[in-house]
Every structure is written in C-alpha cells, then in structure tokens.
Amino acid sequence: MRLALFQPDIPQNLGSAIRLSACLGVTLDIIEPCGFPLSDKAVKRAAMDYGDHARVLRHDSWQKFLAWRDETSQGSVASGGRIILFTTKSAQPYCDFAFAPDDILLMGRESAGVPDEVHACADARLFIPMQPGMRSINVINSAAMALGEALRQTGGFAVTAPVA
C-alpha cells in the first residue's frame, strides 16, 4: 500500500503525511512540483522525528511518477499497483470499494485537486461521503480515512500494540 500526494500546496500537510505514512508503515510518494520550496532539508524538517521511520519517494512530475510505476510493474503487475484517486468528482464511495494490498491511494492538490490527465490515468475514482453543502475534508484527514479502510480490508495494519 502506498500514499501519493499530487503537487501538495501546504508544507504542514506534507509533514502530517510523512508522520501518517511512518505510523501506518506505508510508503509516501510526493509528486512534484509542490506549492512550496521542497528540498531534502525541507522534507526532513517537515517530518520532524518521524523522518527516519518514513519511506518517502519524490517524483519530479506526474510523467516521471507514471514512468516509475510502469518500471516497477515490469514482470509483476502487483508491484506497480492500481492508482486509486480520491476526488469529489466521483460517484463511488470509498467504503464500497475493494482495495488491494498494492494500491496507490492518490490525493489531489489542496487548492485544485488533479487535472483531467491524472483523472484519466486513475484505475478507480472514489469519494468520501460528507454532509450536504460541505466542500471537502482536509487532504491528510482524507488520507487517514482512506488508508484506514484500505489497510483494514487488506489486513495491512501492524498487529503490535502501540507504545505507551
């Protein structure tokens, strides 16, 4: 299971995504460009003390992310994973979807979601049901909900008790 952020706008959300990924044991893919300067030092600062526990992979562009995915798929469909896009432009709720252990859960840019070319590449498009009149849930809260359901379905949660 992987979490991917498409061109994140807010550095604090990136920090939260790194922490979430580290705690849940999933790799985080950052698809650039970001809406803020992103250096290795900035990633380390955003990660705080979770950086040593997180697996973070940076991709310079959407095209490079797709090329990486295609390259990792060579010889094994499982390693490339399906792209599961979370978007308000969907008709399928995430809780009615059957996740697979190698899925890539893709979250759009906070300010604009994803462009049509990204929508076109998604293997599935899901939404998180909300109360009428509400626009969206914070991207990292959405990622936590999505990962929680996906890991629950696939048996991907760690089985150890948390450290007190």
Image (tube, rainbow, N blue to C red):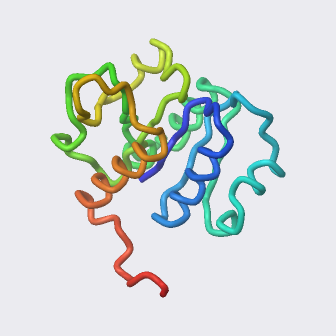
**Which residue sits at x=59%, y=33%?**
65
Q: Position of residue 76 (x, y in %)?
A: 41, 47
Question: Is 122 situated above or below 142?
Answer: above
Residue reaching furthest bottom?
Answer: 164
* Side of 43 where 88 appears, left or right: left
**Which residue sits at x=60%, y=23%?**
63
Q: Relative to the observer, which residue lies in front, 73 or 37? A: 37
* Side of 45 where 91 appears, left or right: left
- Numbered disc total: 0
Q: Position of residue 66 (x, y in %)?
A: 54, 29
Residue reaching furthest left?
Answer: 96
Q: Relative to the observer, which residue lies in front, 63 or 77? A: 63
Q: Position of residue 154 (x, y in %)?
A: 26, 59
Residue reaching furthest top?
Answer: 116
Question: Is 107 situated above or below 162?
Answer: above
* Side of 25 where 40 appears, left or right: right
Question: Is 137 situated above or below 2?
Answer: above
* Side of 64 where 100 appears, left or right: left
Q: Quadrant of residue 159?
A: bottom left
Q: Position of residue 87 (x, y in %)?
A: 37, 27
**Which residue sits at x=46%, y=35%?**
107
**Which residue sits at x=49%, y=29%?**
108
